[in-house]
Image (cartoon, helix red, strand yellow):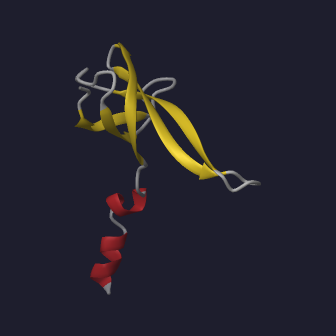
Amino acid sequence: MATDQKAIETPASTRGQRKVRLGTVISDKMNKTVIVQVGTSKAHRLYRKTVQQRTRFKVHDEKNECGVGDLVRITETRPISKEKRWRVLEIVEKAK
């Protein structure tokens, strides 16, 4: 039992999971920052019709390697600036 308790109390397991999103880069004009648009589908409260919802995130891109149209995976992180709370995990697909 004592070994199970130590495994539960490790810092990595107490932090919780960070949010991960998949989105498209719509702007890369800033230095080390890209704007990523993430689309989700939700059912309308009253009519139950599926409604598309789009959210734009300012995302930290340390190497300036993302371009407009790229499909990227982003993750939550500590605040990097006033509006940046996400960073690029990987470029899933480069734009054609």
* Residue 36 coordinates in the image, percent (x, y): 42, 30
Q: Is residue 64 left or right of residue 53?
A: left
| Residue 35 found in image quarter | top left
| Residue 75 found in image quarter | top left
Q: Is residue 7 above or below residue 86?
A: below
Q: Is residue 95 above or below residue 49?
A: above
Decide if residue 79 is in sight here.
no
Q: Pick the residue in front: 28 or 78.
A: 28
Q: Residue at x 38, y 32 (%)?
A: 24
Q: Quadrant of the C terminus?
A: top left
Q: Is residue 48 left or right of residue 96?
A: right
Q: Pick the residue in front: 67 or 51.
A: 51
* Residue 59 coordinates in the image, percent (x, y): 40, 29
Q: Quadrant of the N terminus?
A: bottom left
Q: Residue at x 45, y 28 (%)?
A: 84
* Residue 93 coordinates in the image, percent (x, y): 24, 36
* Residue 4 coordinates in the image, percent (x, y): 31, 80
Q: Residue at x 52, y 45 (%)?
A: 40
Decide if residue 47 is in sight here.
yes
- Outermost bottom residue: 1
Q: How many marks?
A: 0
Q: Pick the residue in front: 55 or 61.
A: 55
